[in-house]
Image (cartoon, rainbow, N blue to C red):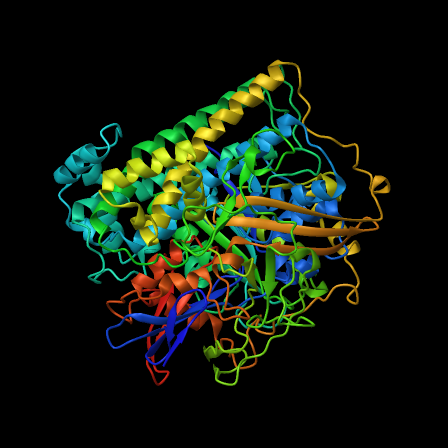
Amino acid sequence: MDEAPSVLVLGIGNLLWADEGFGVRAVEEFHRLYEAPVNVRVMDGGTQGIYLVQHIREADLLVVFDAVDYGLPPAAMKLVEDDEVPAFLGVKKISLHQTGFQEVLAMAQMMGDYPDHLLLVGVQPVELDDYGGSLRPAVRDRIEPAIEIAIDWLGRQGVSIAKRAAPLAEDETLASREMRIGVYESCRPLPEQACRVGDERLLADADFAGPVDFETEIGVLLRSPAGGRG
Amino acid sequence: MGIQTPNGFNLDTAGQRVVVDPVTRIEGHMRCEVNIDENNVIRNAVSTGTMWRGLEVILKGRDPRDAWAFTQRICGVCTGTHALTSVRAVEDALGIMIPENANSIRNIMQLSLQVHDHLVHFYHLHALDWVNPVNALRADPKATSELQQAVSPSHPMSSPGYFRDIQNRLKKFVESGQLGPFKNGYWTNPAYILPPEADLMAVTHYLEALDFQKEIMTVRTIFGGKDTHPNWLVGGVPCAINMDGVMAASAPINMERLNYVRGVIDRSLTFIENVYIPDIIAIGNLYKGWLYGGGLSGKSILAYGDIPDKANDYSAANLMMPQGAIIDGNLKEVLPVDVRDPEQIQEFVPHSWYKYPDEAKGLHPWDGITEPNYQLGPNAKGTRTDIREIDERAKYSWIKAPRWRGHAMEVGPLARYVVGYVQGHEEIKEQVDSTLRALGVPLGALFSTLGRTAARALEAQWAARKQVYFMDKLIATIKAGDSSTANTEKWDPKSWPAEVKGVGFTEAPRGALGHWIRIKNGRIENYQCVVPTTWNGSPRDHAGNIGAFEASLMDTKVERPEEPVEILRTIHSFDPCLACSTHVMGPDGRELANVKVR
């Protein structure tokens, strides 16, 4: 390759609902720990949809961090690559927002600017029904291994990213000052001051059976006409 | 058996039930159920918000100066509008005056969102309710080129070769089995009536708009200092102005950046005038016999107004986007709106999954209570976590029922345009009259699904023009020597009174938006958001009035109940901030179809 590939490291999800903030917290930490070269963009995608299409189109390599609900054991990590990513995002019950993101990928593809390689680093949430809550410890513990997986994967694609000599301070990262994790957690009102739970229908309920054999199930989906890219 | 609602609709629940159900979390999930009679005409409509956002409780006890960042995360689409509404509420509570430059920059950002959201909504979320991309494969590229030149002579991309290329690209995409964003459509439904050439032209513009929209975002990135989630600030805007500065990352606003923004605005206006509006006229002309979906739009509409000309003056006379209310279909009178008046805006919960001490009464948002109370009515089918059929006689929605002086109201571009038209707003009148003339339809045609869609396009044009106005104003103020962008006098909570309350309001792309805040000892004591989808997606109230979505679906004929494209058209015309899954149920609860709504 003559030119360094354009890389997008994207976190998606919603910070306000506990473990659904995993993707965004992961890119904040990525930015805190690693010195991204000019060809690597690290981005908090939040729950934006079509507004992200352009950034996907510009990327040759795309890494997405996200919370994915597939009935896996709590805090289990799931890695999905290339063609499997959109199919995975389209599976019912898999997450709470990416039906939109699957469409974002399809739009980029239709425009003829699709990344050469994709990696989705997903984590099964422990808790979503906690309004204003932060990551559960088990999910928070996945951030560092998730980042290392992404760094390794990018390394295999010929993109090496070095650790910073010293990590950035929390208020120097891409996180907005008001929402950085320390402030978000320490300034939260007590549960007796503000109700934290409300909707019992979040996360797969007891009636939902997770996959017995995840790889087989994804394989079947990929072979089905509706399951492939887009 | 029919029920007459106080707001003038006859509900009949005898027929088959059609159910629309949610997928996304953004701005709450939505579900819609209708009953259709033996002629497939909708005789009862029920709109349900099926997910509680919980924002009010998330904000309780937080620092009011940070509230914008939380509200910005409510929804991935109108992030900036919530942030703006929030900082206005805090500024109102604390009596903070913002500099003129901050007002101009905020207006440019808000107008930029209007332009962006309207354009993306039409092409990428709504057009496929009217346009059939599969039919576009049958178009003659030469005839498409002629059509393009006829509907918009000044749009340069119109050669037969250009349309042939797009068609080939589309063909390859479809033949490979990848319908991508076009999947889940009802492409054989007779409700699609455009000739293949019009379909090809519109699909081509779908692609052009997808490519162009990226530029619009840069306006908010430049002033907000950041991609995807711009920064906002209580007291002004968080960007410094240094006209002689050089351009660099995170540099202050300088002439080079302002010129760049000006270029984006000019190109936005060109795209709207060359592509968006001609498409609305061309497509509207072919569909003008489909005049369903009026709902409350000709009866009861509400606009808070927005875009203050001078800073810090939120009175109707100073707002460039119209403010006012029309009730009972009296199009001769626009009533004044006061978001502070406890008698005007009230939220009711007899049909919402919340608890009030006395549910016969409504509460003004300053005194609002958000305490969840999820329970299904005795006639609901299914389980608490998997509802098959809602019982609308009981509580049935996570959306409260806001009312203006007791009336269910429609909000959004059409509401704003009707209020502006009745008030004699010159630019709005000119735009509306010329559109009606071009389509050869009377004023009454405005009160429809198509009217809602057309008003949005006209408003995009208006918003782009007003961006130019505020750019000129910003540059003139700076040249006169005033480069201040923030007032930090009252930044320190020690300078605040022990207890205060305030309200911020805006016109979000999809309608009137208000945040009501109470601050006690430097912390948020109560925060209530009444969002546009609360108004439009409202359930029934204490008196039995149905909400705007519900009203808009009444009396619509659905050609194929298992492919309810007509329901999608009308619900999408409100630009609801959510995606839905549709299940169509037979009278015995048997599922007829399962379709995704976009």
* Position of the N terminus of chain B by quadrant: bottom left
Residue B479 to residue B297: above or below = above
Residue A127 rendering spot, x and y as whole percentages: 65, 68
Residue B190 rendering spot, x and y as whole percentages: 19, 61
Query: In the image shown, does B336 or A198 lie closer to the viewer?
Result: B336
Residue B307 rendering spot, x and y as whole percentages: 54, 35
Query: In the image shown, does B450 or B256 lie closer to the viewer?
Result: B450
Instruction: Name which residue lies at 22% across and 42% down.
Output: B440
* Position of the C terminus of chain B by quadrant: bottom left
Judged left or right of residue B426, residue B26 is right
Q: Quadrant of residue B292?
A: bottom left
Judged left or right of residue B208, residue B167 is left
Would you say residue A155 is visible in this rendering?
A: no
Judged left or right of residue A224, residue A210 is right
Residue B383 to residue A62: above or below = below
Would you say residue B167 is visible in this rendering?
A: yes
Q: Quadrant of residue B423?
A: top left
Residue at the limit of the structure toward the right, as seen here = B494
Query: In the image shown, does B25 or B443 lie closer to the viewer?
Result: B443
Residue A99 to residue B462: above or below = below
Query: In the image shown, does B333 or B461 lie closer to the viewer?
Result: B333
Q: How many marks?
A: 0
Instruction: Name which residue lies at 66% across and 20% down.
Output: B483
Residue A156 rendering spot, x and y as whole percentages: 52, 48
